[in-house]
Each structure stands twice: as C-alpha cells, then as structure tokens.
Amino acid sequence: MNDFIYKKIERYENLLREMWTASEKYIGTFSVKLLVERVVWDLSKEYREIELLHYNEGMISCAEIAASMKKNPNLPIDDMFMKFITRYVEILSRLIGYENTDKIANWLNEEFRDIPFDSKD
Amino acid sequence: MPANLLLSVSLKYWQNFQDTLAKVMDVNIYIFDINGGSFSRFSRDIEVCQKVNKGEEKICNENCIRFYKDILGSLEDKGVFTCPYGIRLYAYALGTYAQKIGYLIITPARIKEQVGLEEENTFITKANSIYKTVNEVLKAILEKNVLGLRSLELNSIYEISRLLTSTIELEKVMDLITNSLIIIYKAELGFVGLREGDKIRVAQAKGDHDHLFVGKEWPMVQPLIEKFFSKVEPSFLSINELKTLPGLSGLELNSENKIVVYPLWTSLGAVGLLGIVFSPDSMDDNDKRNLQIYANFVAIALANAKLVSRLEREAETDFLTGFFNKRALRNILVNELERTVRYRVPLAVIFMDIDSFKSYNDTFGHVAGDVVLQKTADIIKESIRTVDIAGRYGGEEFVTILPGTNEEGAIAVAERIRKSIEMYPFPHRKVTVSLGIALAKISDSVDSLFERADQALYQAKREGKNRFHLDLS
C-alpha cells in the first residue's frame, strides 16, 4: 500500500478526532461515544472494516483500518469515511441543532479543505 | 421467553447493573431464579446477613434458605415479609403473569429498629420503581436472547442508571435520555415533561423543532394530557392530535411520523411524561418495548428528585411551626457570619425560651403546648423583617438571626416579641418568654455566638424571666 493511502487515513483519523472534540463540548463524552458506536454499528452492514475503528475518551484510532488495507487494498475508504461523517453529522444536528452543527462544519471545512463537510447533507 | 436466568443473562453485566441501581437508590437488592436458587449476589452488605451467612455473598444459612423457599413458593405478585433475623424485605415476582422468571428482593440498606410511616412509604415507592426497571430490563434482555440488548443500548442504560443519584443529576439524566433516543432509535424528537402541581412543564427537548417544546406548560386538565394519564400504557397519536397541546399549533412535522407519549407513573402518582416522535420507518416492536425502559428511568429519576427535594426540605424544616430547624439555622448562620466578617456589617442573634413551658405542657397537655409553640412562632414571624431568619432550635427554644442589626435594633426586636407574647391571650394561662441577645464578633464561630446568646438567655431566666438580657462579654 502506498504512502498516499496511509496519509489519507491519517487525515480522516485527525478529522474524526476533531469531530469528537468539537461535539463533546455540546453533548458530553458519553453521548459522543454512543453516537460513534451507533454510526459504526449502522455502517458495519455496508463496510465491516469500520468495526476496526477504535475509540475511547477522545482517542480515535484508524490504525487497524490502515492495517486491513494490506489485505483489502480496494476498500473504498473515501466512501466509507464520507458515509460515516454524513451519518454522524445528521444525528449530531438533531442533538445540537443545525446552527451549532454548521459552526462545527465550517470550522472543519477550513481545517480539512479537501473533505467536504455539510451538516445539511 | 426463556426462564433460566443464568443461561440467558450475563451475570457479570447484571451484577454491575444491579449494584449500581442498589447504590443510587440506597437499598439492597438480590435476585433468585425461578427455583428459589440464588441468581445474583447481595448488592450491599448487611451486617446481620454477613454474620449468619458467614461472610458469603450468597445466602447459605439454612434458616434463610428455608425462609426464602417458603415465601417465594407462595408469592403471587409481590409481598412484604420479615426474615428470621428481623430484616424487612419486599419481594416481587419477575417476568410476566404467564411466565415467571425469578424473584427480586429489595431490603433497606441499613437496619433500623423503628421505621416511621413516612419512611416506610418512601421506601415502598423506591422499591416499586426498582421492580419496574429491573423487570423491564430483564424482560428486554431475555426476549432478545442473543447477547441481550444491543451493546449501545446496554451502555446507555448502564450510564443512565449510574446517573440516577439526586436532584442535581436530574438534568443530566434527562439530557442523556433524550440524546439516547435520538442516537440509538433515530428519534426525530424527544421531550420530557415534568409535573409541577396542576400542569406539565416541558423541561427537556432534543431534535427537530425542540425550541417549540422547551418551557411549554400544559394543564393536567387539558383533554390530551388527561388522556395520557388515564392509563399506564403509552399513547400513540397523530400530528394533529399533538398540535392540540397549547403552544404547538404551529408545529410542522411529516404527517406520517409516529408519535408516542409515555405517562410517567410512580407510587408518588403521575410525575411527568416522555414524548418521542419517530420517522415512519425507524421503530420496530423491539424498540417500542425497550423504550419503556427509558420511560421507567425517567420516572425513577423524577420520583427520586422529588423525594430528595422533599427530604431536603423536610430536613431543614420544623414540622410543627414550619420554621427552620436547628440544622438549617446553623447553616444559615455560617453564611451570615461570613458576610459579617467580609462586609463588616452587624449581626445579632436572639435566643428565646418560653418560660415554664414544661409545667404548661404537663398541666394542659401536649396539644395545648403545641398550640402555644405554633402561636409563638406566628408572633415571632410578625415581629421581624422579611430579611430576618427565625427558627425553632428545639423544644420550646427559638432562635432569631438578625442580619445588619446592631444592639439597639436587636433590643427593639426582642422587646417587641416579648411584649407581643405577654399580651397574647393564650388559652388556659398567660405565657411569657425570656430572651438572650448576642452581637456577632469578628472572631465568632457559630458555636461561640450561639453559646453567648444562650448564656444571655439563662441570665434573663436567672433575673426573673419575662425579660431579655444582652450579652456584653
């Protein structure tokens, strides 16, 4: 697997970590964990590899997902992570409102310009 | 429904859940399987149980085993029993009428020789709430019968049970419950209404249009609210029905959404309601059943909060006069002394005792004595400003705390109280009081200030009663 994929996964990992921290301020650690767990459970029907995402108290790790790419180099990681983000944001906006979600989205859009992030998707 | 608890339920998970519930509700809990064999362990230690069971966590004493076999064998639904070692316990059959799956035993966390009626009723309320929760969670686990509930449902239930501690945590519990409804069940909206006298006030709402719900007040006599509380089961409504609630006429929801409202009942009566709006395809039958667990949690949290606030209020109030009691007076005086030191404002304390009250009581009876105490409290209240604080220190002793009051002002108040009582036509005979006045010093503690006021009071008694004495030390 080339470095480009590793870098990409690392970038998603950073984004998920920032999402965690930003949401935590609004809904607390436990609800964020529950939300991540829910989205993983939901998405695992389509991408079993998402179950390799490790998370606990603000620590999100995609290391096992990256490792699994050796066996399955054709995993469409962009699609998997984008679906994760979209589903996460969809539920988050119900919890904290569209305005607050937009604030988080705008900030993340600036930080991660190449990853489109829209709370109204 | 499988009946073997040990085969169907992870005991480790269950024990954690049970122990947390026992801790937050301040009770002891244990569960027997359908054959009367121990399933879970004691959640908390009871000294006498530990002794007779030789420190074992499960029941092993022959006397106890025989006792439990007897009572559980004859238990229909629920019952109150006293064990051979004098522990009062509340037993409930778990499962459904059609299929019993075990028995729940709830006992006080500590053994007391005498328990008042109020305390007993409070305990029954707690025990009934615990039974409802335990039964719902067990039923949900057994009916799913794979690994129990989904792991995220278990986590959420566990976390909520951990938070069910006090009034302070009520907000957190409601927050977590509405969050869980949206995250786990993809509810579009969740709201919790608290009963406040003759109305329901929406204290928490999350999801689409939540701003339309928060703070709304709905009278208990409103037809839809009456309908919710006319039964114990949840009500399923249409959008148009929901819009008949005051303040919701402008609500715009998909007409195919499902709306369910759970009335929250405890032994204290109706304590509130939990409302959930779902999109048409997001709730199955299992979800509906599991949602009842959340409704029970909200009911417990609300009942707990009500009990706590009532106990807190009672703990600070003297039942007979409605005045602050000794404990509350001491707490108040701590703050007033701090203010005195910080802002250098005067502070006076008056200790007052009804003269020869014992002989009044002995001669005319306790009822007549209580009338004197109540009227004395009324007279004190009428003789002081709204910023002044009056309390019953115990027996026939009263304390008045006068913030911002100097020697002259304190003497005027003491004399006003003394004269008003002397002039009042109490039944049977004239009643008089003696008063001791002390002014706070920078170096004073609550004890030293009370002590000086008390000494001044005794000086007034020594000088012939029906007078005040000012502490000059």
Image: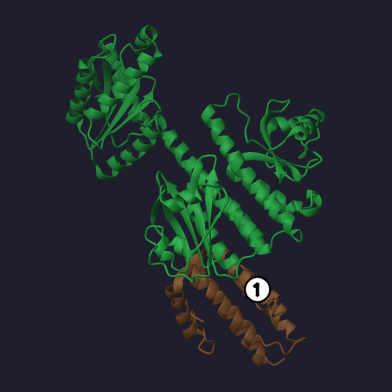
Chain colours: A brown, B green
Chain letter of the residue beneath label 1 in the structure image: A
Relative depth, front residue between B252 and B359: B252
Relative depth, front residue between B258 and B465: B258
Q: Quadrant of residue B419?
A: top left
Q: Position of residue A10 (x, y in %)?
A: 62, 83
Relative depth, front residue between B170 and B228: B228
Q: Position of residue B249 (x, y in %)?
A: 38, 64
Q: Quadrant of residue B409?
A: top left
Q: Position of residue A9 (x, y in %)?
A: 64, 84
Q: Is residue B316 above or below residue B150?
A: above
Q: Residue at x 49, y 46 (%)?
A: B271
Q: Quadrant of the C terminus of chain B?
A: top left
Q: Residue at x 59, y 35 (%)?
A: B124
Q: Is residue B22 visible?
A: no
Q: Residue at x 29, y 42 (%)?
A: B339
Q: Which residue is mark 1?
A: A42
Q: Is residue B325 above or below residue B40?
A: above
